[in-house]
Every structure is written in structure tokens, then in C-alpha cells.
Amino acid sequence: MTIRISQPQDLDALMDIYSYARRFMQAHGNPTQWVNGYPSAELILQEITNRHSYVCEDEKGEIVGTFCFIPGENPTYARIDDGE
């Protein structure tokens, strides 16, 4: 597996992955995360522009995963109560 920084031309593949992830979470007991089209294509394109988005490619060069890596503290996770 190869990990590389995402490129704008990867956007369609990334959106397919996020769409699959939303369906998977809803089907497996997590119906409230990533709803209403989150993350949007605009947000992911911004993460690509900011060089936060990465793709995982298999040995054939096919994109099989993605993640964002944003160094520093995230205020969203500063306090978590009862799993929320």
C-alpha cells in the first residue's frame, strides 16, 4: 500500500469512499455521523488544497482509502461527554 497526498483529480474517488462510509455507518448503528452529505466535495477539495487529505493506494495504484491529517489540536475533541 502507498500513501500519498491527495490531488484534485482524486476528488471523485474520494467522494465515492465517503458515500460508502456514510451508508456503512448508518447500516451499522451510527446514523447521526456524516449526515446531509457531509463531508461535501467543497470541504474535501479544501482539505486537498490545504494538503491535509491523503489517499491510500493498492499495488495497482487504485485508491482504496483516504484520511485527513491535520496537525495540532482540534477543538471539536477538546471535551467529549458520554461518547458525544
Image (cartoon, rainbow, N blue to C red):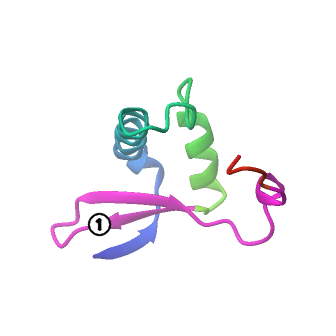
For disc 1, the neighbor class at 10 Å (few under 14, some 14 to 19, many from 20) is some
The reply to whether the magenta stretch includes residue 60 is: yes
The reply to whether the magenta stretch includes residue 77 is: yes
Q: Where is residue 30? Give x, y as percent.
A: 49, 38
Image side of residue 6 versus residue 52, left or right: left
Q: Name the one closer to the observer, 25 or 82.
A: 82
Image side of residue 1 versus residue 79, left or right: left
Residue at 68 percent of width and 65 percent of height: 70
Residue at 53 percent of width and 35 percent of height: 41
- Image label count: 1
Q: Quadrant of residue 15?
A: top left
Q: Name the one closer to the observer, 45 or 83.
A: 83
Q: Quadrant of residue 1?
A: bottom left
Residue matched to label 1: 57
Q: Give the residues drawn in magenta, as a range.
A: 53-79
Q: Where is residue 26? Give x, y as percent.
A: 42, 33
Q: Where is residue 75? Give x, y as percent.
A: 84, 56
Image side of residue 36 versus residue 27, left or right: right
Q: Say what secondary structure mark 1 lies in.
A: strand
**Mark 1 is on which residue type?**
Glu
Q: Name the one closer to the observer, 28 or 75.
A: 28
- Residue 25 against residue 62 in the figure, above or below: above
Q: Residue furthest left?
A: 60
Residue at 29 percent of width and 66 percent of height: 57
Q: Residue furthest top?
A: 36
